[in-house]
Every structure is written in structure tokens, then in C-alpha cells.
Image (cartoon, grey):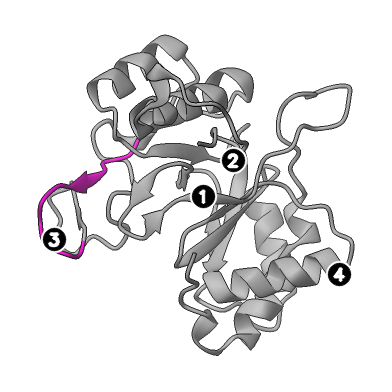
């Protein structure tokens, strides 16, 4: 059995199901890292082979992995609210509200994501947390403004449509959530920042240090790279 960060741990009565693990993950994000979270809508049980979103939209493009009730503006770091949410909805995905003081993110198809991480490693770029599903990988980065992002993208010859940017008003499902895209896991687990201001919170790279490689690998992978088995 592994904890929120993927470390092995001894089983305990409170963790015999994934339900308490989701609550623990939400509390870690909110109280230790000060990342605002809220429960995702989740999946509708017992509806055939393909998972269906719990929201009323039959053609939902991110089944289970988005806020619905409560809405995104309800995201909080308040432990009491989080305890109440996940006590009442123990299987709800953990959704991070991106932007503001919270991390932003860049996501891309899984195959392109794997190639991008390998290229960034070869360049010696220090990466922060990377969230993965079989379909897409998401790199968490330091907060950025729309103006900064716009300048970075304007400098590119072409930005593939398969790249998605999660800034103010965005959201990302975090491990160990289960969504229509599959189980959400850490490809790169969060690691603490260096001693000093922000010590203990996960270190995040600046978006400018990764965006060129993400654009290049997305553009250079046929179809953007749709899916990895894991």
C-alpha cells in the first residue's frame, strides 16, 4: 500500500479503502501546501464499460474530473470544509483550483508528455510535480499571469492545440483520484522546496523553463501522442 505521494506504508484500519486516502490527499494539499481544492463531480456508477460523468451533460469531455456542485469558486484550504466534503462524498476526485497563489499547470497528451520529460531531464531542468493518466500528463508550474503566458506563446512559431494551459479559473484532478481518463497518479511526486521561504511546500518550476520543450514535443509527436498504458 502506498500513500498520497506514492511511498510504501503499512496498512491500517483507516486506509483499507481508497476513500480515506482521498481525504488525506485533499488535506495534505490544503493544509500543508496551501493549495485550494474541492471535490470533483466523480463518475456515475454502474453504467456499462465506459465510465460516465456524474454531471448531467452526456457528452462531457472530462468525465468525473471537473467541479460541478460545489463550483470551482468554492475551492478552499479550510480543513473543516474538506473533512465535511469527503465525509459525505468519500469517492470524490481531488480537484486543484489553479492560478492565483496556487500552482498553474500545462498538460499534453501522454506520449508527448513522456518525451518532453525525457528531453527536460537531458537538459538538466529541475521539474516539479507531474500528474499522469493514461491519456494525458500534466506538469505543475509556478503561478503565471495571462500576460506572461501570452508573451511566451507569441514567441513560438506554432502552438499545438493538444497543449492545454491551466491558469486562473482552471483546474486539475490530482492523485489518487479516479476519473473517466483512468486512475490519476504521480509520474513525478511533489518534492519540498529548499530551506527558507516556502520550505515544506512542493517546489515548482517557472513555466518559461519548460514551455519550449512541451511545444516542441507536442508538435513533433504524431497526433500529439494519445495514450500510454500504465
Q: Position of residue 187 (x, y in %)?
A: 61, 54
Q: Magenta stretch?
A: 39-50
Q: Position of residue 76 (x, y in %)?
A: 45, 23
**Which badge, 3 or 2, is on the more N-terminal residue?**
2
The residue beneath circle 2 is 6
Q: Which label is found at residue 58?
A: 3
**Which badge, 3 or 4, is on the more N-terminal residue?**
3
| Mark 4–mark 1 distance (CA, rounded to whole Å) | 23 Å
Label 2 Cα neighbours within 10 Å, binned few <14 / some 14-19 / many ≥20: some
Can you say whether 171 is above or below 2 in the image? below
| Mark 3–mark 1 distance (CA, rounded to whole Å) | 26 Å
Q: Which label is found at residue 185?
A: 1
Image check: 185 left or right of 42?
A: right
**Which badge, 1 or 2, is on the more N-terminal residue?**
2
Image check: 174 left or right of 120?
A: left
Q: Position of residue 193 (x, y in %)?
A: 80, 32
Q: Which label is found at residue 122?
A: 4
Q: Position of residue 1 (x, y in %)?
A: 50, 36
**Which badge, 4 or 1, is on the more N-terminal residue?**
4
**Which badge, 3 or 1, is on the more N-terminal residue?**
3
Decide: marks 1, 2 in contact (CB < 8 A)? Answer: yes
Amino acid at each position: 500500500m502506498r500513500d498520497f505521494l506514492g511511498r510504501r506504508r503499512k496498512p491500517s484500519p483507516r486506509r483499507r479503502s481508497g476513500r480515506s486516502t482521498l481525504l488525506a490527499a485533499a488535506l495534505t494539499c490544503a493544509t500543508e501546501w496551501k493549495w485550494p481544492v474541492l471535490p470533483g463531480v466523480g463518475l456515475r456508477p454502474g453504467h456499462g464499460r465506459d465510465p460516465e460523468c456524474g454531471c448531467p451533460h452526456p457528452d462531457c469531455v472530462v468525465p468525473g474530473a471537473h467541479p460541478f456542485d460545489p463550483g470551482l469558486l468554492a475551492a478552499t484550504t479550510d480543513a473543516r470544509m474538506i473533512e465535511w466534503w469527503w465525509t459525505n462524498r468519500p469517492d470524490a476526485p481531488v480537484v486543484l483550483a489553479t492560478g492565483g497563489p496556487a500552482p498553474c499547470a500545462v498538460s499534453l497528451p501522454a506520449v508527448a508528455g513522456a518525451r518532453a520529460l525525457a528531453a527536460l531531464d537531458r537538459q538538466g531542468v529541475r521539474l516539479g510535480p507531474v500528474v499522469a493518466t493514461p491519456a494525458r500528463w500534466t506538469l505543475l508550474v509556478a503561478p503565471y499571469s495571462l500576460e506572461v503566458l501570452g508573451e511566451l506563446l507569441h514567441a513560438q512559431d506554432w502552438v499545438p492545440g493538444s497543449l492545454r494551459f491551466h491558469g486562473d479559473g482552471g483546474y486539475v484532478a490530482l492523485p489518487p483520484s479516479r476519473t473517466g481518463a483512468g486512475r490519476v497518479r504521480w509520474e513525478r511526486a511533489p518534492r519540498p522546496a529548499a530551506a527558507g521561504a516556502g520550505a515544506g511546500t512542493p517546489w515548482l518550476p517557472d513555466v518559461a523553463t519548460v514551455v519550449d520543450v512541451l511545444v516542441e514535443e507536442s508538435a513533433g509527436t504524431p497526433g500529439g501522442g494519445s495514450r500510454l498504458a500504465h
